[in-house]
């Protein structure tokens, strides 16, 4: 049996279960998928599937699309998926280790992290952001072009820890220290850069830096 026929047969089973076992024809499948009977017949002849329509069909019924397309059980998918954590990678954003940068924005890619990687990071399982750093103010700890891993759940200040922080002048990656007057000190590891003092009311902690991936192996 062709793969298309196998997939349509699983869809037929779903529709039949909703119709108390009533015989389901290809025209019924086409109607439920939102395509014409002729279009479905053409796709069958070409051994192709209307993937977007099938995805919508499955989402509406809360049925695993992997089961419909590949005969994979939902239980096996959960078991394997739960092994991984998922981080947000902001490929276009930059956190500044020098002057201020722009906001992270809303555009990001979701990337899977293996268990050994998240265990090494020792951060929140699914609250990690990955952002590239620009500037040299945090060298030698964090170098220009490095990727940092930010735990969004870590928003309570640990004196001397490194954080991603939104301040009036932009977004920074800095060590944070509480000043005696109640303000926050944004400190650089590079002694060439002076400390920056800001009011806590004018800042927002994005999260604590829990790991660094350096692109410079020299």
Image (spheres, rainbow, N blue to C red):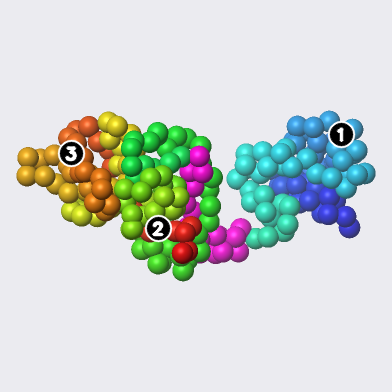
Q: Which residue is mark 2?
A: 212
Q: Which residue is mark 3?
A: 197
Q: Left or right: 181 with respect to 142?
A: left
Task: Report the span colored magenta.
Answer: 74-92
Q: Left or right: 197 with respect to 108?
A: left
Q: Left or right: 82 with respect to 185?
A: right
Find residue 118 and report its horizontal and vertical position in percent: 43, 63
Q: Earlier in the sequence, mark 3 or mark 1?
A: 1
Question: Outermost residue, front direction?
Answer: 192
- Name the residue at 38% across, 36% down: 101
* In front of the other: 135 or 117: 135
- Name the residue at 62% across, 42% down: 59
Closer to the eye: label 3 or 1:
3
Q: Secondary structure at mark 3?
A: strand
Other residues around mark 3 within 10 Å, as few (<14) / some (14–19) / many (≥20): some
Q: Earlier in the sequence, mark 3 or mark 2?
A: 3
- Name the residue at 21% across, 40% down: 196
Other residues around mark 1 within 10 Å, as few (<14) / some (14–19) / many (≥20): few
Other residues around mark 2 within 10 Å, as few (<14) / some (14–19) / many (≥20): some
* In front of the other: 13 or 116: 116
Task: Tell me the distance, in whole angstroms, between the alpha carbons under discs 2 and 1.
Answer: 51 Å
Q: Which residue is mark 1?
A: 39
Cβ atoms at labels 2 and 1 below 8 Å apart? no
Quadrant for the N terminus, please. Answer: bottom right
Task: Tell me the distance, in whole angstroms, between the alpha carbons under discs 3 and 1.
Answer: 65 Å
Cβ atoms at labels 3 and 2 below 8 Å apart? no
Task: Tell me the distance, in whole angstroms, between the alpha carbons under discs 3 and 2.
Answer: 25 Å
Q: Earlier in the sequence, mark 2 or mark 1?
A: 1
């Amino acid at each position: 049996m062709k793969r298309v026929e196998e997939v349509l047969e699983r869809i037929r089973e779903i529709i039949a279960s909703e119709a108390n076992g009533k015989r389901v024809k290809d025209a019924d499948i086409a109607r439920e998928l939102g395509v014409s009977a002729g279009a479905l017949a053409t796709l069958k002849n070409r051994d192709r599937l209307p993937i977007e329509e099938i995805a919508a069909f499955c989402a509406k019924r809360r049925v695993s699309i992997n089961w419909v397309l590949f005969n994979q059980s939902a239980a096996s998918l959960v078991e394997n998926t739960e092994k991984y954590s998922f981080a947000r990678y902001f490929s276009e954003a930059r956190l500044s280790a020098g002057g201020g940068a722009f906001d992270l924005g809303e555009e990001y890619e979701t990337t899977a992290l293996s268990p050994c990687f998240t265990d090494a990071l020792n951060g929140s399982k699914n609250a990690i952001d990955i952002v590239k750093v620009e500037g040299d103010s945090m060298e030698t700890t964090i170098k220009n072009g490095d990727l940092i891993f930010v735990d969004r759940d870590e928003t309570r200040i640990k004196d001397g820890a490194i954080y991603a922080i939104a301040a009036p002048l932009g977004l920074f990656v800095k060590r944070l220290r509480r000043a005696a007057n109640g303000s926050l000190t944004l400190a650089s590891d590079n002694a060439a850069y002076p400390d920056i003092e800001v009011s806590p009311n004018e800042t927002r902690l994005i999260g604590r830096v829990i790991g660094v991936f350096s692109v410079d192996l020299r």
